[in-house]
Amino acid sequence: IVFFHISGYYSIGKHYWIPLKMEANSIRIFIAIELPDAVKRHCISIIEMLKSAGADVGWLKPAGMHLTIKFLGQTQKRLTSRISEELSIVADKQAPIDFRVGNLGVFPNAQRPRVIWSGCHDTSSTLGEFAKKIDEAMSNLGFKREKRIFNPHLTLGRVRSGRNVKQLTSCLDQNKHVMGPEFTASEIILFESVLKASGAEYIELAKQKLMSDLPQV
């Protein structure tokens, strides 16, 4: 909890607070799959449709759209090389993964929506096990294991107030079965998230090809 009288923080708008001084030599990182432009265009078209509800939502920009596999949070920079090594070991044993984007929903529920998402269906049926192996690999480096079952989704926006929420959920319900493009993920990326007043900036720290050691035929 951040109290208003703490001078070591500044606010981004009225919803986010960022410490002026993070832990020395630490960065905020996460592991994700990058999305092709066709998927991002689909997500933007959905966002434009949902904006018609007039709800108070912080919509994501294309640069912020990823399929997050694991959020690692504030981490010592010196660990990034070891994280990359662990990701390489897991990625070398994972074939490329096929996806189909489709369906709309909210977290935690339609009565009190906080996060608006588009589904990302793993048609290869291997993503869940892949995410579990990444979780296990990161736990070897001291990161906490995930307690929740991995639920792949693409975050479209975050609800900031109750304004026009009923109109928003009605629009979502009317379009909940809309389907998007298919795509194949062939690499996993370690990103740094840099929080700025203008929004988060994402920096690619490491990239690992899936099944990069597959014998050539």
Image (tube, rainbow, N blue to C red):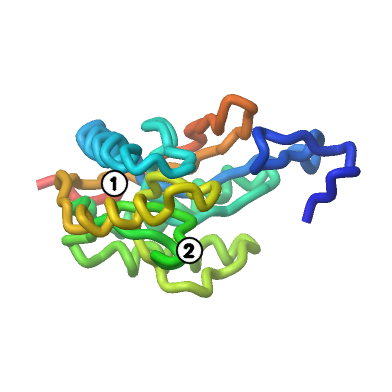
Question: In the rendered image, is residue 100 in sight?
Answer: yes
Question: In the rendered image, is residue 35 in sight?
Answer: no
Q: Quadrant of the N terminus?
A: bottom right
The label nearer to you, 2 versus 1, is: 2
Q: Earlier in the sequence, mark 2 or mark 1?
A: 2
* Residue farthest toward the top in the current orientation of the protein: 198
Residue 25 occupies quadrant: top right
Element type where label 2 sits in the image: loop
User: 49 or 182: which is nearer to us?
Assistant: 49
Q: Which mark is residue 112?
A: 2
Decide: few, some or many residues near mark 2? Use Cα within 10 Å; few <14, some 14-19, many ≥20: some
User: In the image, what residue occupies the spot 43% across and 37% down?
Assistant: 60
Q: Which mark is residue 90?
A: none
Q: Which mark is residue 212?
A: 1
User: In the image, what residue occupies the spot 49% across and 48% down?
Assistant: 163
Residue type, numbered disc 1: Ser
Residue 78 percent across, percent down from the top left: 67, 43
Residue type, numbered disc 2: Arg
User: In the image, what residue occupies the spot 64% across and 47% down?
Assistant: 79
Q: CA distance from mark 2 to mark 1?
A: 43 Å
* Residue farthest toward the left in the current orientation of the protein: 217
